[in-house]
Amino acid sequence: MDSSLHRKENVNLQLLTYVCFTFVGYFIIGLSLSVLPIFISKNLGFSLLIAGLVISLQYVSTFFLRAYSGKVIDGKGPKPAVLFSMISFSLTGVFLILAYYFKLSPLISLSFLVITRLLTGCAEGMIGASPINWAMMAVGEKHTAKIISYNGVACYGALAIGASLGVTIEHEFGLYGIGILSIILGILGFLFAKTKENKTNTNPQEAQSFWKVLGKVAPFGVCLALGGIGFASISTFITLYYNHFHWNNGALCLSVFGGLFVAGRLVFSNVINNYGGIKVAIACLLVETIGLLFIAFAPNAQIALIGAGITGLGFSLIFPALGVMAIKSVSPSSQGSALAGYGLFIDISLGVAGPIIGSVADFFGMQFIFPFSAAMVFIGLGLAYFLKMKSAKH
């Protein structure tokens, strides 16, 4: 019994040494997530549509790097991908500082922010599946569900903490402070990754092409993408939404979202194995829809905060529930590409959501963005139910 407990603790500690790279990466992403839309619209004077487009550029470059990262992981191992991402994260800090110093020249400042977002996307594209695959190679595929769950906790926990801290840092030091911290964290992540042993695929000749793998994981990915719109609406526009209604501390919604997200991952960690991925995804999409409707019709900031928490709880298990199924749909030698391809769909979701939700806000009013987001997630719920019915027939 003691030996079994000791092995479990060792596995958990090992996992933490890999998912910490996810935490560092998404913490850096989170630092600027809440402040850039306001900086672009209020300080530089551009529209919400432009703000949404600039934020979404991150997901465009992430999209193109996913296929490359899957190829690197399956061929050379995850370590090179992690090292590349940490260098890119450090460079985002450099261009954030430049954007801050040229803030009195809006077009120049915006140009540096465009470069920042593209670099952030490159970094995210390389870090997305790398720690998961690295951990799977180190501790075994039997821990896949746990690895994906831990990685998600690191990802969204880091986003929530980073977003709240980013608002504080920006208030005290401007984008300069966020830039400096990004540079330091990227360098520390790079140095730690250098100390770890790389793991490589033992059967690279069996690996399928990325696009063939993408076709296999696509049904799960589309469902994930629709569920991701709820997260995108909160992460990108909640501070502006609060500002529109003259409510205080919109960034707290991201913290509450992240807190309930983490709680959902930890408390309900076994439900995927017990009930199956599709059933869990259906339940989660329903809860997420309800949470977004709470925000949409909230008469005050407190009710909106409750809605953010419900949304976080609903979104918590969507990625691992569908991700485990996506991984099982391919051979072990193609799992790097499977995770990279599956992750593409959340990138598409977040990339499309920025300009679309920004357009909804510009043309119909800020109050319509969360009813719109709830409708998109509800469509995802319908698709998940369709997939369940389809699988039941086979």
Image: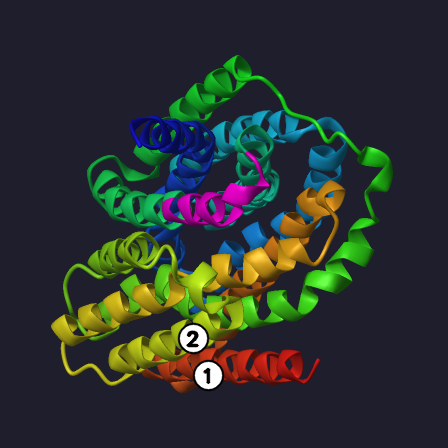
At label 1, counting other C-alpha atoms closer than 10 Å, the crowd grade (few under 14, some 14-19, many 20 or more) is many
In the picture, the quarter occupied by the C terminus is bottom right
Answer whether residue 263 is visible to the viewer in this image: yes
Along the line of sight, which residue is nearer the eye, 235 or 2? 2
What is the number of the mark on residue 285?
2
Mark 1: amino acid: Phe
Along the line of sight, which residue is nearer the eye, 244 or 192? 192
What is the number of the mark on residue 19?
none
Quick check: 44 above or below 272? above
User: Is 54 situated left or right of 389 in this image?
Assistant: left
Colour logic: rainbow
Residue 136, position as x, y percentages in the image: 57, 37
Mark 2: amino acid: Leu
Q: Secondary structure at mark 2?
A: helix
**Count of marks overlaid on the render:** 2
Residue 63, position as x, y percentages in the image: 65, 53
Answer whether residue 108 is visible to the viewer in this image: no
Q: Are marks 2 and 1 in contact (CB under 8 Å)?
A: yes
Q: Secondary structure at mark 1?
A: helix
Q: Magenta region: which residues? A: 140-153
What is the number of the mark on residue 378?
1
Q: Residue at x 44, y 70 (%)?
A: 280
Q: Residue at x 70, y 42 (%)?
A: 70
Quick check: 90 above or below 368? above
